[in-house]
Image (cartoon, rainbow, N blue to C red):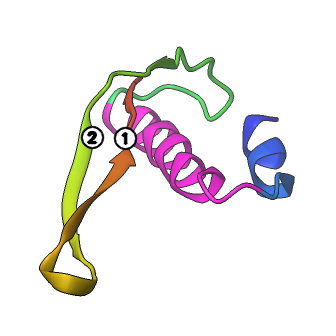
Amino acid sequence: QTLMILELMPYRACYPIFKLVYSAAANASHNRGLKKLIYLLVKPKSTKVLSSKVKTASSGRSYPIKRPTCHITI
């Protein structure tokens, strides 16, 4: 059910989360012998980790580019 919801959502971040949940279910069924229909406990932690880069601008100035990131624990 979670995979169907993630496939139909139009957001850009849904595809990496879809891959993560699918991979976790496959690892659980292969390594621990669990069934495909398992409940996954997902704890998204929104920390303030920012990936920063520098963008050059006119007159020799530079502006920081900040990308927010998120840590997901299954």
Q: Which mark is residue 69?
A: 1
* Pointers 2 and 1 in contact (C-beta within 8 Å): yes
Quadrant housing residue 68: top left
Report the amino acid beneath label 1.
Thr
In the visual, does 24 lie left or right of 52? right
x and y percentages locating residue 55 in the rendered image: 25, 73
Magenta span of residues: 11-31
Task: Name above or below for residue 51 compared with residue 24.
Answer: below
Between 32 and 39, the one lying in front of the other is 39
x and y percentages locating residue 9 in the rendered image: 82, 51
Residue 21 belongs to the span the image colors magenta: yes
Which residue is depicted at the point 27% across and 80% down? 57
x and y percentages locating residue 71 in the rendered image: 35, 30
Which residue is depicted at the point 37% across and 40% down? 69
Quadrant housing residue 54: bottom left
Residue indicated by mark 2: 50
Q: Nearer the viewer, mark 2 or mark 1?
A: 2
